[in-house]
Image: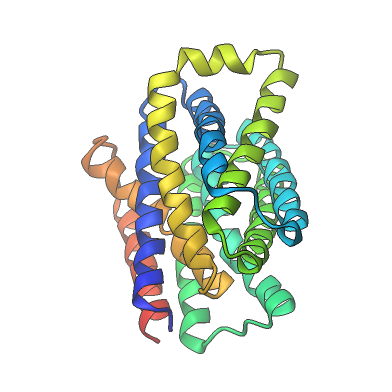
C-alpha cells in the first residue's frame, strides 16, 4: 500500500497535469503552447539550479538517458498524431505506460506489485483503453498511428524507469528535477529549430501563457518525482495517468465539451483502480 503523503502528492501532480493540458488545449495553437511551456520550464530552472546545485555524478547517466528517451517518445507521439486522432493516440500512450512499467519495475527494481496494486494498474489502464476505443469508434484510424502510439508508450515507461532510478540515487530531488527540465527544454528547442522555426521567437510570442503553464507543470513534476523516490514505479505511473480522467472532468464542466456515458464508465474504472492501489 502506498503511503498517504506520496499518494496525495501523485494525485495532486495528476490534477496539475490535467489543468495545464486543458490550458494549452483551449488555445488556438495548443502544440506551440506545449512546446513553449517545456522550453519556459527550462528557462525558469536555470536560476533555480544555481541555488540547489548540480546533481551528483552517479545520476547523470540516468538523467541523460531519460531526456533522450523522452525526446524519442515525443517524436513518436507527434508521428502518431499525424496518422491518427489525438483522442485515440493519447489514451493508448497513457494506458501503455503503467502496463509496460510493471515488468520493467520487476526487472530493474525487483518491485513485485501486490495483487491490489496490479489490479489497480490494470483497471486504470483499462479505463484509458476504453477512452481510446471510444475515439476509434468515432472515426477511422491508421494502424501505423496506433503503432507509433504504442512505441511512444514504451518510451514513456522507459523514461519513468530512468527517472525512478535517478531520483533514488540522489539526495537532491529539486536539482534532479531542474536538470530534467533544462534537458527537455534543450531537446525540444532543437526539434523546433530542425522544423525550421526559431525557438526564441516562438517562446517570446507565447511567453505569458507558456511561463504560467510551466510553473504549474513544474510544480506537478516536482511532486511526482519526489513521490517516485519511495513509491513503487508502476503504481506511481498508473496513478499519474489519472490525469487523463481529471482532464475529462475539466473538459465536461469547464470547457463544456460533450462527454458521453462510456466516458463516465472509464472514469469510474479509473477511480476503482485508484482505490485498489491505495487500499489493497
Taking the spot 45% from the left edge, 76% from the top edge, the residue there is 120
In the picture shown, does residue 70 fall above or below 105? above
| Left or right of residue 80, residue 129 in this image | left
Residue 31 vertical placement versus 197 (above, below): below
At 54% from the left and 58% from the top, the residue drawn is: 173
Which quarter of the figure has residue 213?
top left
The one of 182 and 253 positioned closer to us in this rendering? 182
The residue lying furthest to the left in this view is: 253
Quadrant containing the N terminus is bottom left
List x then y, in percent, for residue 278. 38, 78
Horizontal and vertical percent for residue 244?
42, 52
Q: Nearer the viewer, residue 57 or 138?
A: 57
Residue at 64% of width from left, 48% of height from top? Answer: 54
Left or right, 106 with respect to 116, comes to right
Q: Is 15 placed left or right of 59 in the picture? A: left
Q: Tell me where residue 46 appears, x and y as whole percent.
A: 57, 35
Amino acid at each position: 500500500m502506498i503511503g498517504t503523503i506520496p499518494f496525495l502528492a501523485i494525485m495532486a501532480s495528476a490534477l496539475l497535469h490535467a489543468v495545464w493540458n486543458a490550458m494549452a488545449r483551449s488555445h488556438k495553437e495548443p502544440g506551440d503552447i506545449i512546446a513553449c511551456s517545456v522550453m519556459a520550464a527550462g528557462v525558469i530552472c536555470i536560476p533555480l539550479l544555481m541555488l540547489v546545485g548540480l546533481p551528483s555524478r552517479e545520476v547523470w547517466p540516468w538523467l541523460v538517458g531519460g531526456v533522450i528517451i523522452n525526446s524519442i517518445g515525443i517524436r513518436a507521439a507527434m508521428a502518431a498524431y499525424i496518422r491518427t486522432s489525438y483522442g485515440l493516440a493519447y489514451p493508448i500512450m497513457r494506458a501503455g505506460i503503467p502496463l509496460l512499467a510493471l515488468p520493467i519495475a520487476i526487472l530493474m527494481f525487483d518491485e513485485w506489485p501486490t495483487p491490489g496494486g496490479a489490479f489497480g494498474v490494470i483497471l486504470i489502464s483499462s479505463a484509458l483503453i476504453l477512452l481510446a476505443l471510444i475515439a476509434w469508434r468515432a472515426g477511422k484510424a491508421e494502424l501505423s498511428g496506433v503503432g507509433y502510439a504504442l512505441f511512444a508508450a514504451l518510451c514513456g515507461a522507459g523514461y519513468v524507469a530512468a527517472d525512478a532510478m535517478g531520483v533514488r540515487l540522489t539526495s537532491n530531488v529539486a536539482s534532479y528535477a531542474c536538470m530534467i527540465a533544462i534537458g527537455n527544454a534543450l531537446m525540444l528547442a532543437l526539434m523546433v529549430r530542425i522544423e525550421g522555426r526559431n525557438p526564441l521567437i516562438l517562446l517570446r510570442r507565447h511567453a505569458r501563457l507558456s511561463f504560467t503553464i510551466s510553473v504549474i507543470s513544474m510544480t506537478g513534476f516536482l511532486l511526482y518525482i519526489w513521490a517516485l523516490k519511495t513509491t513503487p514505479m508502476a503504481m506511481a505511473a498508473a496513478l499519474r495517468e489519472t490525469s487523463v480522467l481529471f482532464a475529462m472532468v475539466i473538459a465536461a464542466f469547464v470547457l463544456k465539451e460533450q462527454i458521453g456515458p462510456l466516458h463516465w464508465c472509464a472514469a469510474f474504472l479509473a477511480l476503482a483502480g485508484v482505490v485498489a492501489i491505495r487500499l489493497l
